[in-house]
Image (spheres, rainbow, N blue to C red):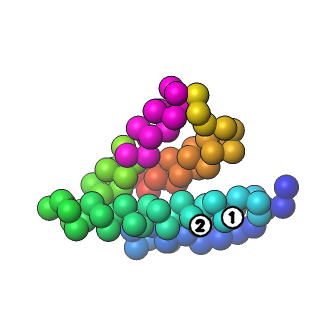
């Protein structure tokens, strides 16, 4: 698979990554979803610290992954995407 270099902005920090070209759309959608969840948590909770907000996102996504795995309704592509999201969030924290 061809790798491409991209820069991801998560919580106002830039993270350079090399990903498979075929994963770029999913990774960018994941980053957009994380940004939306960060805004949600920031506007609905009295939390301003970005690391705390990222931790809340990580817990949300990790628990969704656990639920999907438990219910056996996840295919390998979805799992890989969620694992990438989790890895990116872990890198931030």
Q: In the rendered image of this protein, does residue 39 appear above or below residue 87? A: below
Comparing 48 with 44, the one in front is: 44
- What quarter of the picture does the N terminus occupy? bottom right
Range drawn in magenta: 60-71
Q: Which residue is mark 1?
A: 24
The structure residue drawn at horizontal position 18% and vertical position 59%, both measured from the top left corner, is 45
Q: CA distance from mark 2 to mark 1?
A: 6 Å
> Residue 76: where, in percent of width, then height?
69, 38
The structure residue drawn at horizontal position 40% and vertical position 73%, both measured from the top left corner, is 12
Residue at the limit of the structure toward the left, as seen here: 46
Quadrant in the picture for residue 40: bottom left
Q: Residues within 10 Å of mark 2 (few under 14, many from 20)?
A: some
> Residue 9: where, in percent of width, then height?
49, 71
Q: Are dots 2 and 1 in contact, CB under 8 Å?
A: yes
State the predominant SS element of the stretch in magenta: helix
Q: Which residue is mark 2?
A: 28
Q: Is residue 61 magenta?
A: yes
> Residue 42: where, in percent of width, then height?
25, 65
> Residue 69: where, in percent of width, then height?
54, 30
Element under label 1?
helix
Q: Is residue 16 left or right of residue 47?
A: right
Q: Is residue 77 left or right of residue 38?
A: right
The structure residue drawn at horizontal position 63% and vertical position 60%, both measured from the top left corner, is 26
Observer able to see residue 15: no
Element under label 2?
helix
Q: Is residue 10 magenta?
A: no
């Amino acid at each position: 698979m061809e790798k491409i270099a991209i820069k991801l902005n998560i919580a106002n920090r830039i993270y350079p990554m090399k990903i498979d070209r075929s994963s770029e759309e999913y990774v960018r959608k994941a980053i957009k979803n994380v940004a939306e969840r960060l805004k949600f948590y920031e506007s609905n909770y009295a939390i301003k610290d970005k690391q705390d907000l990222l931790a809340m996102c990580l817990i949300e996504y990790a628990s969704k992954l656990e639920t999907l795995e438990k219910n056996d309704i996840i295919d390998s592509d979805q799992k890989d995407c969620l694992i990438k999201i989790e890895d990116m969030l872990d890198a931030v924290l």
